[in-house]
Image (tube, grey):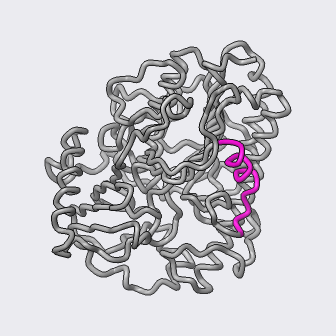
Amino acid sequence: MTDPARPNILLVHWHDLGRHLGTYGRTGVPSPHLDALAAQGIRFDRAFGTAPLCSPARGSLFTGRYPHDNGLLGLAHLGWEYKPGVRTMPALLGEAGYRTALAGMQHESSDPATLGYDEFFALRRDHLEREYCGPVTDAAVDWLERNARRPEPFFLVVGFEETHRPYPPELYPPDDPATVHVPGYLPDNAWTRDDLAAFQGSIRVADQAVGRLLGELDRLGIARDTWVVFTTDHGMAFPGGKSTLYDPGTEVALIMRPPAAWNAPLGATDRLISHVDVLPTMLDTLGIAIPAQVQGVSHAAWLTGRDLSPSRDRVFTEKNFHDGYDPIRAVRTEQYKYIRNFEERPQLALPGDIESSPTRRGLGDNHLRHRPAEELYDLAIDPWERTNLATDPVYRELCEELAAVLLAWQRETGDPLLDGPLAASPWPRQPRYGALVPHVGGPWAR
């Protein structure tokens, strides 16, 4: 049996999911394995990524540092990399005696060998190729079979790309559009329903792969001794979600099933938590020193049942570069969201994958209106952030207060945006990430 103080860890991450799962109340979503995992563990109902696009969001998850601090201001395949000396989750756990491995996708670096894993199984040969969950799961299961019974604990990261656009129907048979759950920030029409039906087809396939991984832990007899963490990078790839700092762009599914020996507070929780907190929580829970550079807060005392008080009353999010330069910062409390836009842009600057989506065709052009410099929303009465209160005299004092909180965070974390416009990536622009190329075998270890 693994030492409860140093359990095995399985971390599974998906693309562009937000919280579009049955366990989060999205009716009709085919996610039975993740729903069951949530029923056995902890479901965080107010978890947020630090950024609404892939590399910056994942960078915070794996370093406990905000994108403007760790160097991942934009997408890795467009030239963004961690700053020299940034320490990652696998590197820190490896130094503490864990065997570490990555199966499937990562989007933090052009070279996965720099990320600190002992082993990695990259099933693509270039950044245009998708890493399908079938071969990725095969590689992960094979690794578990070879390593699960060794005396030292393991840290296995499994990355799936299924829920990133596009959703080819020959790979992901779509759901019935009449049965899909349409979130309130999207237009409920045939275009959106068809798009969501395709998205849910990819969720079904990826959920089945998660079921295989969890089943392998059961088969090997190590499920009770393994800390399972499931999450995604940011919100759904739909207009008003991905690439925005509205809740649908930064909300994330976060599900944990701690080892059975812990006195964890199982069930759903509405405590605020940010992806930047996952690394310090993990290290603190395992008794590993948290590096001074880490900017998240630890929830370890809560997770192990020692202190059930809140550890956060606000989360911070940012955007810098996606398809183009679009610097935004935001602070979210339990009730309010304040957004500061640093450049003049349309209300929604849609990235290419959303601009070409079916939902965009049924959206109209109202999102092209001018974006204000400041936005303020009362999430209790306006959860979809439709009514901007920043210019309402009734909310002026609150707006100024949250603006000061945001500025203080920028100064505390050394946000380079305070010195003026950010410098672009030094690399030449590369082809867009996410184009589908049929998988032709593998694995290939690089």
Q: Position of residue 119 (x, y in %)?
A: 62, 26
412 drawn magenta: no
What segment is highlighted magenta in the picture? 28-41
The quadrant in which the C terminus is found is top right
Looking at the picture, tell me which residue is in the foreground, 143 or 406: 406
Rendered location of residue 325, percent (x, y): 29, 59
Image quarter of residue 389 = bottom left
Vertical position of residue 99 compared to residue 383: above or below: above
Q: Residue at x 70, y 56 (%)?
A: 438
Residue drawn 34% across the image and 56% down it? 332
Residue 237 position, x and y percent, is 52, 65
On screen, residue 285 versus residue 324, left or right, reads right
Q: Is residue 37 found inside the magenta-colored segment of the image?
A: yes
Residue 309 locus on image (x, y percent): 44, 38
Q: Residue at x 63, y 60 (%)?
A: 436
Instruction: Check the picture and name the quadrant holding the N terminus.
Output: top right
Residue 118 in view: yes
Q: Is residue 53 above or below residue 76?
A: below
Q: Is residue 81 left or right of residue 158?
A: left
221 or 398: which is nearer to us?
398
Give the farthest residue toward the left. 419
Which residue is the extreme one toward the right?
A: 219
Question: Which residue appears at 19% of the width and 54% of the height?
Answer: 421
Q: Is residue 143 visible?
A: no
